[in-house]
């Protein structure tokens, strides 16, 4: 499965699972009756975790991911299905094996725990939103023109 994290493309050969956890923090108060009184007490959080095996060009990915995790830089995680979310790396586990003659790993098993980022929009987020609103405006103009033309024919 092909996916992208930040600027690095993964050619993931084996994917055990991609897990998505969403937590909604609520406080509960006991009440008389069948329904508990609940109230949101914080912002909800969403995590994505997956295990993968990468077999080639593994040496370039690790420094990129480490610096992104250390700085808590938001980056895009894009899956083959087309789903794209902005995330930060919360946890990363790396197991290297099958070394070549130069001592570099040929196989790397990597586990990620990513947190979906809902902070200040990045430049790319702003560009995507701008493109969406431009397309909407264009579609509305086209619909208005077609409606006007059809109105004259009817």
Image: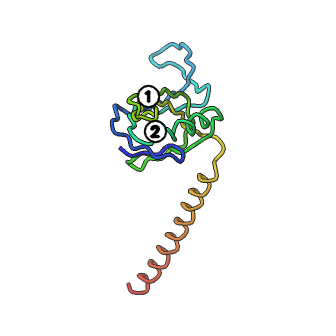
Mark 2 surroundings: few (<14), some (14-19) or many (≥20) residues within 10 A: some
Mark 1 surroundings: few (<14), some (14-19) or many (≥20) residues within 10 A: some
- At which x and y percent is residue 64? 57, 40
To which quarter of the image does residue 41 belong? Answer: top right
Q: Quadrant of the N terminus?
A: top left
Between 65 and 86, which is closer to the camera in this rendering? 65
Q: Is residue 5 visible?
A: yes
Residue at 51% x, 13% y is 32
Helix, strand or loop under label 1? strand
- 86 relative position to 21: left or right: right
Q: Is residue 19 visible?
A: no
Q: Which mark is residue 58?
A: 2
The coloring applied to the image is rainbow
- At which x and y percent is residue 24? 52, 27
To which quarter of the image does residue 132 belong? Answer: bottom right
Residue at 60% x, 60% y is 130
Residue at 64% x, 53% y is 123
- 29 relative position to 71: left or right: left
Helix, strand or loop under label 2? loop
Q: Which mark is residue 96?
A: 1
- Relative vertical location of residue 133 with respect to residue 125 in this rendering, above or below: below
CB of mark 1 within 8 Å of CB of mark 2? yes
Residue at 55% x, 31% y is 45
Q: CA distance from mark 1 to mark 2?
A: 9 Å
To which quarter of the image does residue 151 belong? Answer: bottom left
Q: Which mark is residue 135?
A: none
- At which x and y percent is residue 7? 53, 48
- At which x and y percent is residue 89? 55, 33
Which comes sooner in the sequence, label 1 or label 2?
2
Q: Quadrant of the C terminus?
A: bottom left
């Amino acid at each position: 499965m092909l996916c992208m994290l930040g600027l690095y493309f993964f050619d993931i050969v084996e994917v055990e699972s991609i897990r998505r956890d969403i937590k909604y923090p609520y406080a509960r108060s006991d009440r008389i009756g069948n329904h508990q009184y609940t109230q949101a007490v914080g912002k909800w959080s969403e995590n994505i975790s997956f295990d993968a095996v990468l077999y080639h060009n593994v040496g370039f990915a690790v420094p990129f991911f480490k610096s992104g995790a250390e700085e808590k830089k938001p980056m895009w995680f894009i899956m083959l299905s087309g789903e794209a979310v902005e995330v930060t790396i919360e946890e990363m586990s790396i197991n290297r094996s099958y070394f070549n003659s130069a001592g570099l790993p040929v196989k790397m098993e990597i586990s990620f725990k990513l947190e979906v980022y809902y902070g200040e929009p990045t430049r790319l987020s702003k560009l995507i939103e701008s493109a969406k609103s431009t397309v909407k405006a264009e579609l509305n103009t086209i619909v208005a023109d077609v409606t006007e033309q059809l109105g004259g024919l009817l």
